[in-house]
Amino acid sequence: MGWIVVVSGGPGGRDYITEIARRKARAAEVLIGSRMQLQSIGPLEGQTVHEETSIERIMELIELHRGRETAVVVTGDAGIYSLSQKIIDRFGKDAVKEIVPGVSSLQVAFARIKEPWLNVRVFSFHGRPLEGLEEILKHERVAILCDREHNSKLILEKLLACGLFDHQRDIYVCQELTLPEERVIKIDSKEDLERIEVKGKEIVVILRIKD
């Protein structure tokens, strides 16, 4: 019988965590998540709550509470570049009682630019090495998940050498989605690229326009 409930916490804004995700998280004996996630959920009195973002420490806490229903809140949707896979790799599928789906930042980004996200090729450099950039521009519809080190400005600057502006493309930098400081920036030139002010949470969307 599994004891781990993986809860999709949405992209950040408290309005974007689903009601069932909030309910499942509050029903668990143990709740693990970031400060922002825990504030969005509002833990119940009597729950054992751990504010934690370190992947290794989260794994240790899951093991520590083996046998007690433990809700682990993951960013966005559990099915997209999520901690959920690391949990399954470590503990096995049988240890996972349930995965609660949610809203991903990818979905929000495409909603903001009023485009469908069907057939989008997703690249993640969040906590991953900056490799394979030459593959990005081979696809017509691309979303790139960034982090502080591998941020939107750095990635787009490197894509210049791969021919970023050689074809007509719509390029967007989506920052802090669903948060009060949310911003969507259209990049039409090298000058626009140079003016980007890097933020903590960023997604780059590149859409090739047919000639």
Image: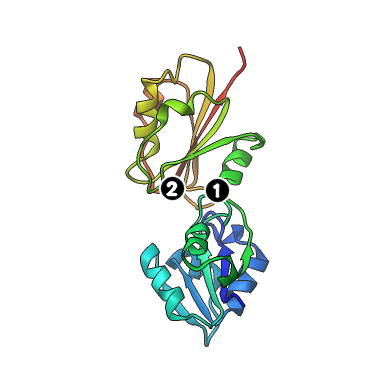
The spot of residue 132 in percent (x, y) is: 41, 32
Q: Are marks 1 and 2 in contact (CB under 8 Å)?
A: yes
| Quarter that holds the C terminus | top right
Residue kind at label 1, given as amino acid type: Ser
- SS category of the residue bearing label 1: helix
Residue kind at label 2, given as amino acid type: Lys
Q: CA distance from mark 1 to mark 2?
A: 9 Å
Q: Is residue 40 above or below residue 103?
A: below
N-term mark: 1 or 2: 1
Asked which quadrant contains residue 19, the reply is bottom right
Residue 79 shown left or right of residue 133 in the figure = right
Which residue occupies 43% across, 48% down? Answer: 201
| Quarter that holds the N terminus | bottom right
The residue furthest top is 211
Callout 1: 10 Å neighbours few (<14), some, many (20+)? many
Asked which quadrant contains residue 193, the reply is top left
| Front residue of 210 and 99 | 99
* Residue named by callout 1: 105
Which residue occupies 55% across, 55% down? Answer: 76
Which residue occupies 36% across, 30% down? Answer: 195
* Residue named by callout 2: 201
